[in-house]
């Protein structure tokens, strides 16, 4: 087969599915695809299953935690993994299936949406595959990431059937909105933004044309479409209103300046996942976005033709406005700058998909996409392999820890260390802040660094009298800090007679913090009331058992 004789659409389609399949390599070439918060999400899914199964295990967890009965967002990923665990899926595979669901849903969903906008610009979905792995996903924000992917499907479904509603399609649309809500409100809000904008623009076009030959007047078409979408969205309107009523907006100021978030946006730093060197490649992607946008504007100016799809350009402008006017946190959600940085690019991507680009531009974009894809993959893959090896070393500690005990994991190197070479696993992210939580995914133990249960935004909540973020943390820092600190010995007095049965340390002996007082405090407490009972193969992780007096 001569590739030169194949038509560009055929080549593009083949490249899309090739790169989509290659996007699964980081997930399936390792035992653990380690993310920042992913181990904690998987652990909490396991605890939810223990609550569901009942018995003495549930009674044990009832001493420490209770299930959040409110209809919170952030349930999607936990329910997904809990279901798989309940079907007998090994824990590491349950997380991997959720990660795979996101990667495939993102790529295929984007292509589905672009097809509804302009079937002649599907190459844009291939270019968009470069955005699949981003910093927020690597942080382990699975629900947020899935909300972006499902947003493509929900919005694309509405675009496809917006003038052909049936009861069945309205039900599918309603279920899509519910899935978005239980992932993260961001995807839901931007889906509503696109749908509302298209409705208004199509009304404006209909009124401007004043085409009396159509059976329905523009206002009637607008009314029918609006009623259909309102009915489909009614359940999430109620849920979202109740959520905001209880949580409140509670905006908090951001620490980043306008200049800083502009620089991050311009360089597309959200594409840096594992290593800072990725930022160079991310900047090249941002440049190509800018070049495609300039070319698209030139083509629009030349054609002087306006279509309903041009509404995505002002939607891009709204996304930019939201990005620059965002607070540091709102309604319980924090770290907004890095979360929202990708949204303007995604909205711009959809508008670019509405343009009929010349073949040379399509071919050049596909060639660029291939080069950058390979470049980023070659940087990231070795570090994912090191991360998995480090996680396996960390998790080996679970072998000496029984069920129904409390365990405090203390990480002294959130970047992680490769067991073989001693190199840091990642320098662009704290990958091992919750790496020890993998220990709790195969056992029924209480992990005292479970940050989710301290927020009120996830399916599990600490019982107040044993909340380790009150009774175990110290005035000068949490046990998640670097270096960590904790009142391990005094926890019994600060809680309802709860104790720390086991302490697991990660990289404590690497002397990263020298003679830091926090490090000395932890070492003194362990020396006084705990025995060392296990050391991992390369000495990176150690297990200390409380001496029963």
Image (cartoon, grey):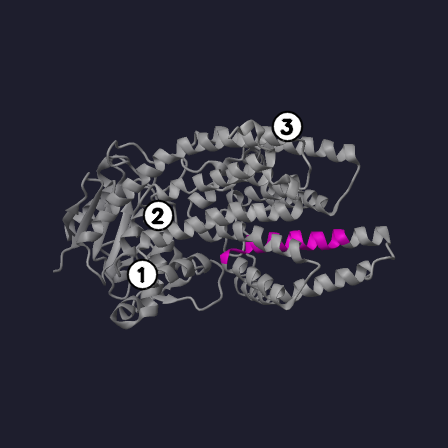
Q: Which numbered marker is on residue 88?
A: 1
The one of 145 and 1 positioned closer to us in this rendering:
1
Q: Which mark is residue 541?
A: none
Q: Is residue 282 above or below residue 393?
A: above
- In space, the residues marked 2 and 1 are separated at their CA atoms by 39 Å
Region rendered in magenta: 183-202
Element type where label 3 sits in the image:
helix
Residue 142 point in image, percent of width and height: 45, 51
Residue that numbered label 3 is attached to:
360
Q: Quadrant of residue 380?
A: top left
Residue at the spot of label 2: 477
Foreground tag (2 vs 1)? 1
Rendering coords of residue 150 (x, y %): 54, 53
**Looking at this rendering, what residue extends furthest in the front direction?**
1
- Total marks drawn? 3
- Report the Cα–Cα distance between label 2 and label 3: 56 Å
- Image quadrant where residue 423 sits: top left
* Residue depicted at x 46% and y 41%: 135
Asked if residue 191 lies in the magenta stretch, the reply is yes
| 448 falls in the magenta region | no
Q: Dot 1 lies on which element? A: loop
């Amino acid at each position: 087969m001569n590739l030169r004789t194949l038509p560009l659409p055929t080549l593009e389609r083949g490249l899309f599915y090739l790169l989509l399949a290659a996007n699964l390599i980081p997930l399936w070439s390792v035992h653990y695809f380690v993310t920042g918060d992913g181990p904690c999400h998987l652990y909490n899914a396991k605890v939810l299953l223990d609550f569901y199964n009942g018995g003495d295990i549930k009674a044990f967890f009832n001493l420490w935690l209770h299930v959040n009965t409110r209809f919170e967002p952030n349930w999607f990923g936990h329910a997904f993994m809990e279901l798989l665990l309940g079907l007998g899926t090994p824990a590491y595979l349950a997380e991997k299936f959720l990660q795979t669901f996101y990667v495939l849903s993102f790529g295929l969903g984007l292509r589905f949406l672009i097809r509804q906008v302009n079937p002649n610009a599907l190459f844009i979905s291939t270019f968009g595959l470069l955005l699949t792995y981003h910093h927020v996903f690597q942080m382990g924000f699975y629900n947020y990431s899935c909300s972006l992917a499902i947003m493509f499907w929900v919005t694309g479904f509405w675009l496809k059937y917006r003038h052909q509603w049936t009861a069945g399609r309205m039900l599918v649309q309603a279920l899509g909105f519910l899935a978005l809500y239980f992932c993260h409100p961001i995807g839901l809000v931007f889906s509503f933004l696109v749908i509302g904008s298209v409705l208004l623009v199509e009304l404006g076009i209909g009124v401007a044309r004043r085409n009396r030959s159509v059976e329905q007047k523009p206002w009637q078409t607008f009314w029918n479409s609006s009623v259909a979408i309102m009915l489909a969205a009614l359940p999430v309107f109620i849920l979202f209103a109740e959520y905001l009523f209880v949580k409140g907006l509670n905006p908090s100021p951001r620490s980043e300046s306008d200049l800083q978030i502009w620089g991050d946006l311009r360089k597309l730093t959200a594409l840096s996942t594992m290593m800072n060197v990725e930022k160079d490649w991310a900047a090249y992607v941002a440049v190509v976005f800018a070049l495609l946008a300039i070319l698209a504007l030139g083509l629009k100016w030349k054609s002087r033709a306006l279509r309903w799809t041009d509404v995505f350009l002002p939607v891009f402008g709204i996304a930019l406005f939201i990005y620059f006017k965002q607070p540091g946190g709102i309604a319980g959600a924090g770290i907004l700058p890095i979360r929202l940085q990708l949204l303007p690019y995604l909205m711009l991507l959809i508008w670019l998909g509405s343009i009929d680009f010349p073949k040379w531009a399509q071919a050049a974009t596909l060639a660029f996409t291939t080069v950058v894809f390979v470049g980023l993959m070659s940087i990231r893959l070795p570090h994912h392999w090191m991360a998995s090896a480090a996680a396996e070393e960390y998790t080996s500690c679970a072998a000496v820890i029984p069920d129904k005990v409390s365990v405090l994991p203390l990480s002294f190197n959130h970047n992680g260390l490769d067991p073989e070479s001693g190199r840091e696993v990642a320098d662009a992210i704290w990958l091992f802040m919750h790496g020890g939580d993998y220990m709790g995914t195969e056992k029924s133990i209480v992990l005292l660094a479970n940050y989710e249960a301290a927020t009120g935004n996830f399916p599990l909540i600490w019982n107040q009298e044993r909340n380790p973020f009150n009774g175990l943390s110290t005035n000068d820092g949490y046990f998640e800090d670097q270096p960590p600190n904790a009142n391990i010995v005094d926890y019994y007095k600060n809680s309802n007679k709860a104790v720390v049965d086991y302490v697991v340390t990660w990289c404590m002996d690497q002397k990263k913090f020298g003679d830091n007082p926090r490090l000395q405090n932890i070492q003194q407490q362990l020396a006084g009331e705990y025995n060392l009972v296990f050391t991992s193969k390369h000495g990176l992780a150690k297990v200390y058992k409380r001496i029963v007096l």
